[in-house]
Image: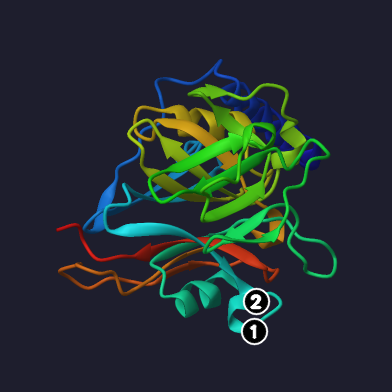
Amino acid sequence: MRIAGSISKACATVAAVLATAHGTAAEGDPTVSWQPLGPDIEQANTSLNPDSLFSSSVVMVRSSLLRFKLQVIKASDFGWKRAPVRALCRAAGATACVNSNFFDEQGKALGLVISRGIVHQKIHKGGGTLTGVLFVTPKSVGLAHRDAFSPVGVVEATQAGPRVISESAIVPGLKESSFRTNLSGVCLDRNGRVVLYRVTSGVFGASLPLLQRLLLSPSVQCAEALNFDGGGSSQFYISGSIPGHTGATREENFPGTDDVPVVVGLVPVAPPS
């Protein structure tokens, strides 16, 4: 009887989580507090459905790219086939990094990879997952559907998916079951800032509707957002040495179980004169 009662209680809690995910039991929009890590870089830590026993934690870092550049970092740049995000980030001298491309059983990245203006892999056109491309030109950063992407003038690019936010709205038709795991991703907000994020899933995994709601909230304001490889590949790293920081900083590492071939990082650049 105790077991049955526990199951009933757990089911009720899960139902409440799903109800909140679809907006039927929520009060107000999610709110996060951004804390400066240094000039032009901020961090926020929050939760999806924080009042639930099964909440998922979220870490985000954002920058307007005045003192940083967004760079595609490949394990092969350092003689590795794959490596942890922390190792790649430190080797590249980056301040914050998240894993990006999916990869096959041999560890080869799937989809488009452009680094320093060199196309290392061509764009993948098939299937319903790798639908988005994050790209950098000398003057801008963009996130586009693969069918609308042009490589002309692009110096950095990574392909992943699916897209979760487009034109400041939820992308419809995504399967919730595909997101019941740790998640990584990138967002471009309405002010042109880049937001890298990682979701550490709770007991029942991360909720796609709750994540989308967080990304669209007034505290984050994503105009475009793209899902990166999740599960054991999902990793996030923040350096303990941040240019311009006036006090002590603490290295933060959110590891995964699988080494990865490609990451996206915020690399310090000289401040504008």
Residue 57 screen position, x and y as percent: 50, 49
- Secondary element under disc 2, as helix, strand or loop, is helix
Name the one closer to the observer, 229 or 111.
111
Above or below residue 154? Residue 221 is above
Q: Do the residues labelled 1 and 2 touch (CB within 8 Å)?
A: yes
The answer to whether 90 appears left or right of 232 in the picture is: left
Whether residue 8 is visible to the viewer of this picture, yes or no, is yes
- Residue 79 numbered mark, or none: 1
- Residue 76 numbered mark, or none: 2
Label 2 Cα crowd, 10 Å radius (few <14 / some 14-19 / many 20+):
few
The answer to whether 200 appears left or right of 160 in the picture is: left
Q: Which residue is painted at 41% across and 69% down in the image?
A: 94
The single residue placed furthest to the bottom in the displayed view is 79
Q: Which residue is painted at 58% across and 35% down in the image?
A: 144
Q: In the rendered image, which quarter contains the C terminus? A: bottom left
Specify the amino acid type for callout 2: Ser
Label 1 Cα crowd, 10 Å radius (few <14 / some 14-19 / many 20+):
few
